[in-house]
Image (cartoon, coloured by chain):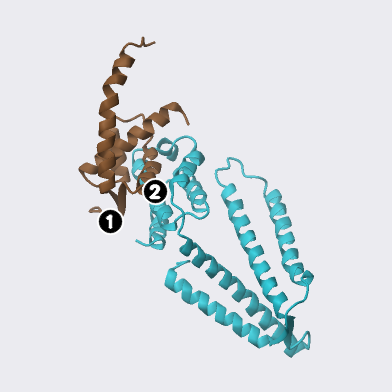
Amino acid sequence: MNAKDIIELNNELREQLNKENLAAYEDMLTYIRLSSNKSEQQTEEVLLELLEHLLEAQKSGKTAKDIFGEDLKQYCDELINEIPGEKMTKNMRFWSYIALQYLAVITLTFGLLSFLLHSFFQLGESSLRFPLGTGVIAILLDLGLFYLLVRFILAWMKNSSFKEKRPKKWVEFLQLWLIMTCAIALFYFIPKLLPHFGTTITVHNLVIAAIGVILYLIAKILNKRYRFTS
Amino acid sequence: MSQRSQLLKGILEGCILAIIQQEPAYGYELSMKLQKFGLTEVSEGSIYPILLRLQKEKLIIGEMRKSESGPNRKYYHLTDKGEEALQSFIEHWISIKHPVENILERVKRR
């Protein structure tokens, strides 16, 4: 069974848990799934085993803590410790997919928006002129920043499991808002602050949009082949 | 880690290998068997980190299989390396079992 099939089975079976066990199990699930660079296959297999065990035990009135111990977080850490790491190639494939998807959205949006603004409202230029060297470095830095942001959000989510008391909503909102504002500022200013180097090239807005579409299609094909999301 | 769990872990590993050697088993089944043999001190869930480790060390192999009652289950069986590990566990166990018992017998129990 592929990891994605196991996830589907897990989603179905999970509905049979009672409220208390479901809350505990979902905390464990989130925490374990968000531990970075672990084999997805092994992770999902052990998560299904835990779920099946809990479902059986539930029939005789046992709770998650009866089975996995009082300290669920510590138990999960113990498990995570023993789950083998994801293979390098699988990891690279996954992050390439994410990078492609991200670049596709950006180029498509930028190309299309610039094209529409220029043709209907005579705003901006019909094409983008930029020094090639600067452009490449800007894209790489952008990807790096995006990677850090994703990692940060995953760590944030992992950190929020097993909390008896959730922090106040507005505090969480403010913290995230601050981080996102900083990230957006960085995304905006990094290309502006880079020195200009390399030959200057001119690319028509529609060509940029077309590149976006092509990247999107490649990402889609990769996803179909390697089942990143379904 | 407490002394108790350190001691138990190694022994549990050996017991798990021994039970799987008799016939392939899945997680829940395995923990029920351990309980039935009287190892009730061990929390049921403690077998899963051990099963992961034994897989990593290639002593056992887990395979998702359809069971008779329907759901897919991960059945574990022993590898050749696991067989060797079990034999050496048994040897070690026999060589320390009696000495330890003899030593502990002299201790006045409170």
Q: Which residue is drawn at 71% across and 52% down?
A: A175
Which amino acid type corresponds to the residue marked 2 in the rendered image?
A: Leu
Viewer-nearest of discs 2 and 1 = 1
- The answer to whether the residues at label 2 and label 1 have Cβ atoms under 8 Å apart is no
Residue most toward the left? B22
Neighbours of disc 1 within 10 Å: few (<14), some (14-19), many (20+): some
Q: Is mark 1 on a helix, strand or loop?
A: strand
Q: Is mark 2 on a helix, strand or loop?
A: helix
Q: In which quarter of the image is residue B87?
A: top left
Which amino acid type corresponds to the residue marked 1 in the rendered image?
A: Arg
Rendering coords of residue A23 (x, y %): 49, 46
A221 w.r.t. B41: above or below: below
Residue beneath disc 2: A51
Q: Residue A44 carries which label?
A: none
Neighbours of disc 2 within 10 Å: few (<14), some (14-19), many (20+): many
Q: In which quarter of the image is residue A66?
A: top left
- Res. B71 visible in picture: no
Q: Mark 2 lies on which chain?
A: A
Quadrant location, the N terminus of chain A: bottom left
Q: Which chain carries label 1?
A: B
Instruction: Evaluate whether label 2 is on the same chain as label 1.
Output: no
* Colour chain B is painted in: brown
What is the distance, in whole Å, between disc 2 and disc 1 at their CAs? 16 Å
* Colour chain A is painted in: cyan
**Count of all numbered marks drawn on residues in the image:** 2
The residue closer to the viewer here, A22 or A127, is A127
The residue closer to the viewer here, A18 or B33, is B33
Residue beneath disc 1: B65
Q: Which residue is drawn at 28% across and 24% down?
A: B97
Say whether residue A154 is left or right of residue A174: left
The residue closer to the viewer here, B33 or A136, is A136
